[in-house]
Structure formats: structure tokens, C-alpha cells
Amino acid sequence: MNANEIIEIENQHAAGTYAKQALVIVRGQGALLFDADGVEYLDCAAGHGVANLGHAHPKIAEALYKQANTLITLFESFPNDQRAMVMQKLTSLVDGLDRVFLCNSGTESVEAAFKFSRLSTGRKNIVAAMRAFHGRTYGSLSATYNKKYREGFEPLVPGFSHVAYNNIEALEKAVDEETAAVILEVVQGEGGVYPASAEYIQAARRICDERGALLIVDEIQTGFGRTGKMFAIEHFGVTPDLLCCAKSLAGGVPMGAVLIGKRIKNLVPGVHGSTFGGNPLSCAAANAALNVIAEEDLVGQAAAKGKYLMEKLSAIQSPNIREVRGLGLMIGIEMKQKVAPYVKALQEKHIIALNAGMTVIRLLPPLVITYEQIDRLVEALSEVLSRTEDEGQ
Ligand SMILES: *Cc1c(COP(=O)(O)O)cnc(C)c1O
């Protein structure tokens, strides 16, 4: 099958829910992706933050090969060595979160957190933030703010409301004795790369405590080193009641998890479950991924490389840039114009970047990106971002 045939087949047979690039990717290595002709691209999207360890990491490949030859599937009713190990590792990451529910994706971890919150508190309402993105199944979609994701799918789940992000007063007003949980991203990803302030996250903890509500943090994009801490919440010294993670948890293999605090009650056999949740193959990949994060100090690397990249970006002189913001290696460049032409121009320079909304370029490179590759990214960005419209973006 040649590249044109591949594109043709996907255009003809895919459901149609994705805007497809005319670029076939067949292989990856570290922070690089390669097309069907072997042409190299620098991946600064990492599958929206899935490939924190880079592509084709040998430790992940080895763990998958070994486990595939040992045991791929096992329902969670039966204990298993790989699963026990991943449970031990995950619950050792955050003090006070001693239990874990395993699933297969981000949205599933958010759904589980909502179900656990209602079950635990006997309350119905969930307070989320404006600009929030929590996923696309009905519960998580009800917490997602942007109407572009919601339109056409109503009625959504009742009991959800949205308040301005980073606004303590709005949260004070919205959370009451009927609130089961507040859900927040620590850095809003899809919404435009907006980091929370320390005061806001700390106030959210206090407000939830005062009103008997639970605090859920969605670390699906910010988790596993992305922001220069294992979890972004560590920047603010706050422990949530439920922590959702997925994306890079298993080194690129599909897996999600909810870490669960002591205040969560009523989790008894039968109240929730997942056929593939906690399967030994994904667990083996997650064990390998967590080992790699520790061995290669990817958390420290994200902090150092994020600082380096942020300094370089801040030095770019362009009247088109409104603001550069972010945390660790999760960076948004807000432009004064729509960013689609910039993202396209970057791709022509063999750099894959993301947008976050209409006016923000989002950079989520693998944490293993080299300093040389960062320099290459910065060079391309300084050239592309300084262009004006009539220079043919
Ligand atoms: C990607 C993402 C999700 C949804 O994860 P899926 O695996 O696509 O269901 C939820 N919340 C945040 C913050 C995300 O970045």
C-alpha cells in the first residue's frame, strides 16, 4: 500500500470524526516520527501528551513482548503480579491516595470519578470549570465546557455546572451542600494551556472541605512528568480526593486510572467495573513506563527542558505573539491571529505541533526531546511566528 492509497482508504472508510492530515506516519523513534518515505518529523504533540517517553521506547517494547507471551488478558476478579505491581507503584506516587481503579482511557477515568463521587456523597451535582475538557462520553462531556464538543448531543447528564477558572469567588458561590464534587484540570489543556494559580487550587481544596464536597483533579494531560512534577498538583501542595490519569500512564499503550482517597466510601463489589481494566498487558507496559520515568529522571528533565524552551520562546520578538505560558513541557503560545496557518507552516518545516482553540499553539513534546531538537523547534518557530499574512503563511 503506498501513501496515497492509505490516505484514500482512510478518507473513504473512517467514520469522518477526524480532520485528517495528508501525511502517513508509519514509524517513530524518541521524539521523531517518520512518514512512508522515511522523511523525518519532530513530534511536538506526542499524541496530545501520550508519548511522554518518546516513540518505540525499547523498555516498553520489551515489556509488551514478554507479557504478550505470558498473559494478555485477565479480569480483575483474579489478582495478578503485573496488576499488583502497578497498583503499588501508582498509590505510592501521591500521599493519601491509597486505592486505584484501573480502566482504559481518560474519559473512563473521569466517568469512574463522577460515579464514585455521587456514590460516596449521596449528592448529585458536579461543578466544573469554563474552558474545561474532560472527555467525550456522556458524563465527561457534561463536564466539558466548549459547545463545539457538546452540540448535537443534548440532553447531557443533569447536575453539571461551570464556573470561571482561576476565580475563587465563583467557586465559593457554586459549591454548596448539594455538590458531590468539583473537577479541575491543574493546567487546562484543550482549553488553551492555562495553568491554575496556587491560590485557586488551594482554595478549591478548602471550599470542598468546608462544604463536604470531593475534589477531583484531571491529570490526564498533565500527569507523569509533563509539567516538571510527577503530577501537576504537586506544584501546589494539595491532595485531591480523586486523581484521574491516562494518556502517558502506560508508555503509549491504552490505559487509565483513578487514584482514590480515604474519603471515598461505598466502593463495594459490583458498583463499577471494566472488562479490559487492569489487564496484565497494559499493566506490564505501565510498570515499564513508571520505571523508565524514574530511571531517566523524566520529571527532572521536563522541568529543565521546559525552562529552557520557555526562555527561548520568550526571547522571540514577534508582534504576532500575545503571550507564552505553561508549566514544564506543556506550553501554549497565544497569538493575535488564528493559529491554523502557523501549525500548517510548522508542519511544512517538519514539525508537528497542536493548536488549543483558535489562537493558541500548544507544544507537548515527548519528555525525551533533546536540547538540539528543542533548538530546532525554536528556530522554526521564530521564523514562522514572525511571518505576516502577506508573506504567505
Ligand atoms: C485527553 C484528555 C481527556 C480524555 O481522554 P481520552 O483518553 O481521550 O478519553 C480528559 N481530560 C483531559 C484533561 C485530557 O487531556
Image: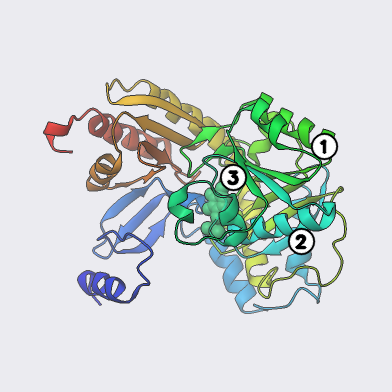
Which numbered disc, 1 or 3, marks the residue closer to the eye? 1
Question: Reading the chain from its start, which is encountered first: label 2 or label 1?
Answer: 2
Where residue 278 sits: x, y (%)? 70, 68
- SS category of the residue bearing label 2: helix
Nearer-the-camera pick, 145 or 228: 145
Q: In this rendering, does residue 247 appear at all?
A: no
| Residue under numbered circle 3 | 296
Where residue 281 sits: x, y (%)? 64, 71
| Residue under numbered circle 2 | 85
Which numbered disc, 2 or 3, marks the residue closer to the eye? 2
Nearer-the-camera pick, 285 or 261: 261
Question: Reading the chain from its start, which is encountered first: label 2 or label 3?
Answer: 2
Seen at 63% across and 62% down, the residue is 108
Q: Marks 2 and 3, Cα distance to the nearest angstrom?
A: 20 Å
* Quarter of the rendering occupied by the N terminus: bottom left
Mark 3 belongs to which amino acid?
Glu
Mark 1 neighbour class, 10 Å CA radius: few under 14, some 14 to 19, many 20 or more:
some
Which numbered disc, 2 or 1, marks the residue closer to the eye? 1
Figure quadrant of residue 324: top left
